[in-house]
Amino acid sequence: MKVKLIVVGKTKKTFLLEGEKEYKKRLKRYLNLEVIELPDVKNAKKRSEEEIKREESKNILSKIASTDHVELLDENGRSYSSVKFAKHLEQHFIHGGQTLVFIIGGPYGFHDDVYKRANSKLALSEMTFSHQMIRMIFFEQVYRAMTILKGEPYHHQ
């Protein structure tokens, strides 16, 4: 199964980059993970939030195939426990065929065009995190889910 993570902008904080690197390394033994970093919108300070979201949406949608299953990381999405998230991933792996695409938007969220394309929304927390920080949290949760599915001793209940 292929999992793709599309993110808007780059992570700049060293501690977050190190965490991302560690979990991406760990994930290699479980799945084919592709990370696509889209550049921040140029001249953003001179643009409205709507213009920024529209430009980001063009970049995001250009990276998605018509057969991809798309889940947005969105504060209004469905929340899962770690075990239920693992089962959620497992269902996609069992049915296979489609690339599972997760998207982390920029600081203003997603344009309506991206919401229309999405198959579902996923909330990692009711709290708000920076879009840079959520990347590391997401990688850790995918890693945790994979260890749960494999019966490995990373997750404790």
Image (tube, grey):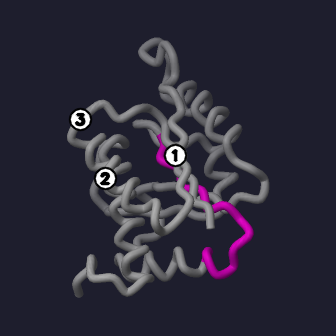
- Alpha carbons under labels 1 and 2: distance apart: 14 Å
Residue kind at label 1, given as amino acid type:
Val
Is there CB contact under 8 Å for labels 3 and 1? no
Is there CB contact under 8 Å for labels 2 and 3? no
Total number of numbered discs in the rendering: 3
The quarter of the picture where residue 154 lies is: bottom left
Q: Is residue 157 left or right of residue 75?
A: left
Comes first in the chain, label 3 or label 1? 3
Front residue of this view, candidates 80 and 86: 86
Is there CB contact under 8 Å for labels 1 and 2? no
Q: Determine whether the residue tagged by mark 2 lies in a helix, strand or loop.
A: helix
Q: Is residue 72 magenta?
A: no
Instruction: Tell me the number on the disc at residue 14.
Output: 3
Quadrant where the N terminus sits is bottom right
The x and y percentages for residue 52 are 53, 27
Residue at x-position 55% and y-position 50%? 34
Residue kind at label 3, given as amino acid type:
Thr
Q: Determine whether the residue tagged by mark 1 lies in a helix, strand or loop.
A: strand
Camera-side mark, 2 or 3: 2
Front residue of this view, candidates 75 and 133: 133
Comes first in the chain, label 1 or label 2? 2
The x and y percentages for residue 35 are 52, 46
Mark 2, residue position = 22
Comes first in the chain, label 2 or label 3? 3
- Alpha carbons under labels 3 and 1: distance apart: 18 Å
| Residue 10 higher or lower than 132, as above or below | above
Q: How many C-alpha atoms fall within 10 Å of the one at disc 1: few (<14), some, or many (≥20)?
A: some
Residue kind at label 2, given as amino acid type:
Glu
**The magenta segment:** 92-105
Q: How many C-alpha atoms fall within 10 Å of the one at disc 3: few (<14), some, or many (≥20)?
A: few
